[in-house]
C-alpha cells in the first residue's frame, strides 16, 4: 500500500505544476494575440520597412528559444543530435512559408482596424483543417465542417464591410481590399499549409518546439535576406538603412510578436489544439476591448454581425472533434 501512495504523492504535484504552467502560457498568449494588432499599429510607423520588422522578430525568437533551452538544460543535447538534412526536411519549407506570411501580415496590420484583422486572421483555422486532411488525412466531424462554413461566412461579411470602407483605417476601398483583406487572407492560406507541415514534422521527426522555432527562424531569415536582393524593401534598406523610421517603441511589437511565437509552441505542445482554440476566442474579446479602450471606436455593424459567428465557429470546431468509430468484434 505504501508504494502506490508514494507514486500518487509524486505525480500529483507534477500534474498540478503542468496545469498551472499551461494556464499561465494560455493567459500570456491570449493577451499577446489580442493586443498585437493594436500594438503594431500604435508603435510601428508606416514608413518602417516591413522586411526589417520581420527579420528583427525572427532574431528575437531565436534568442528567446535558445535561452529557454539553456534554462531547461536541453540545449547541449539538442544541438549534439542536430543535423542539417533533418533540419531542412523538417523546417525548411514551413520556414519559407511563414516568412512570407509574416510579411503579408505586417502589410495588413497597417490597412485594417484591429478587430477586423483579428477576425479575418481566424480563417487560417479553415485552411489548417484543409491542409491537415490533405497531408495527414485527419478527418473532420460534421459539426466541425459546419463551424468552418460559419467562419467563411464571417470572412465574407468582413470583406464586404471593409470594401465599403466602414470601420477601417483608410478611406480608399482599393487600398483596403488589396493591402488589407487580400494579404491577411493569403497569409491565412499560407499559415494553414505551414501548420500542417509543422505537425507532420513533429510527428515524424519528433522535433521540440524550441528547436523548430530556432530552425524556422534561421531558414526564414535567410529566405528573406535573399529576397531583398531584388525587392523594393531591399532597395529601401540600401537607400535609407536597416532601421529607417524605427523608434525605441518599435521594439515593443517586435518583442511581443517573438514572445507570441514561443507561446504558440508551448501551448500547443502542452495543452493541444483545444486550449489553443479557447485562447484564440479569448484573444478576439481582448482585441475588441483594447480597441474600444485605446482607440475610442466601437466595432462596425459588419464586425458586430461577424463577431458571434467567429466565436461560435471556433468554439464548435474545438468542442466536437472527429471520433473514430470502434469496430465491434
Image (cartoon, rainbow, N blue to C red):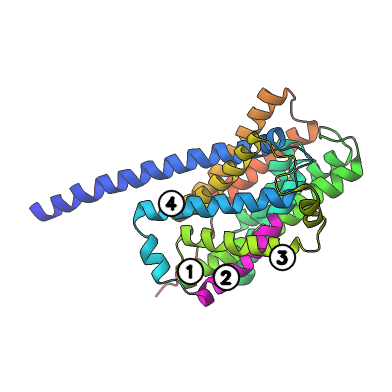
As rendered, which of 225 and 35 lies closer to the eye?
A: 225
Give me the C-alpha separation between circle 1 and circle 2. Answer: 10 Å
The crowding category of the residue bearing disc 2, from other C-alpha atoms within 10 Å (few below 14, some 14 to 19, many at least 20), is some
- Tag 1–tag 2 contact (CB < 8 Å): yes
Residue in view at x 47 percent, y 72 percent? 205
Q: Please tell me whether the stretch drawn in magenta is mainly helix, strand or loop.
A: helix
Q: Which residue is disc 2 drawn over?
A: 136
Residue in view at x 48 percent, y 69 percent? 203
Q: Is residue 87 above or below residue 184?
A: below
Q: Which residue is disc 1 drawn over?
A: 203
Q: Which residue is disc 3 drawn over?
A: 226
Give me the C-alpha separation between circle 2 and circle 3. Answer: 31 Å
Q: Is residue 270 above or below residue 165?
A: below
As rendered, which of 269 and 300 lies closer to the eye?
A: 269
Of labels 4 and 1, earlier in sequence is 4
The crowding category of the residue bearing disc 3, from other C-alpha atoms within 10 Å (few below 14, some 14 to 19, many at least 20), is few
Amino acid at each position: 500500500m505504501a508504494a502506490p501512495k508514494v507514486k500518487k504523492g509524486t505525480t500529483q504535484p507534477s500534474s498540478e505544476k503542468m496545469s498551472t504552467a499551461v494556464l499561465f502560457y494560455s493567459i500570456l498568449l491570449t493577451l499577446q494575440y489580442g493586443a498585437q494588432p493594436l500594438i503594431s499599429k500604435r508603435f510601428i510607423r508606416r514608413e518602417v520597412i516591413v522586411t526589417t520588422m520581420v527579420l528583427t522578430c525572427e532574431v528575437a525568437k531565436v534568442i528567446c528559444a535558445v535561452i529557454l533551452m539553456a534554462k531547461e538544460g536541453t540545449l547541449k543535447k539538442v544541438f549534439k543530435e542536430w543535423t542539417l538534412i533533418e533540419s531542412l526536411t523538417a523546417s525548411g519549407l514551413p520556414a519559407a512559408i511563414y516568412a512570407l506570411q509574416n510579411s503579408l501580415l505586417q502589410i495588413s496590420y497597417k490597412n485594417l482596424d484591429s478587430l477586423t484583422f483579428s477576425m479575418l486572421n481566424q480563417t487560417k483555422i479553415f485552411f489548417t483543417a484543409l491542409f491537415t486532411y490533405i497531408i495527414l488525412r485527419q478527418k473532420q466531424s460534421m459539426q466541425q465542417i459546419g463551424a468552418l462554413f460559419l467562419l467563411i461566412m464571417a470572412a465574407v461579411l468582413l470583406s464586404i464591410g471593409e470594401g465599403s470602407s466602414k470601420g477601417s483605417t483608410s478611406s480608399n476601398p482599393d487600398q483596403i481590399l488589396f493591402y488589407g483583406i487580400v494579404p491577411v487572407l493569403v497569409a491565412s492560406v499560407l499559415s494553414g499549409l505551414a501548420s500542417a507541415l509543422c505537425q507532420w514534422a513533429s510527428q515524424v521527426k519528433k522535433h521540440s518546439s524550441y528547436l523548430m522555432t530556432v530552425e524556422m527562424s534561421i531558414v526564414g531569415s535567410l529566405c528573406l535576406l535573399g529576397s531583398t536582393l531584388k525587392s523594393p524593401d531591399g532597395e529601401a534598406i540600401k537607400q535609407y538603412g536597416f532601421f529607417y523610421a524605427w523608434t525605441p517603441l518599435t521594439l515593443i511589437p517586435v518583442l511581443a510578436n517573438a514572445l507570441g511565437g514561443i507561446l504558440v509552441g508551448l501551448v500547443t505542445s502542452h495543452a493541444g489544439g483545444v486550449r489553443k482554440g479557447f485562447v484564440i476566442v479569448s484573444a478576439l474579446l481582448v482585441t475588441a476591448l483594447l480597441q474600444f479602450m485605446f482607440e475610442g471606436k466601437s466595432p462596425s455593424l459588419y464586425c458586430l454581425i461577424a463577431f458571434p459567428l467567429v466565436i461560435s465557429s471556433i468554439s464548435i470546431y474545438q468542442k466536437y472533434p472527429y471520433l473514430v468509430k470502434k469496430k465491434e468484434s
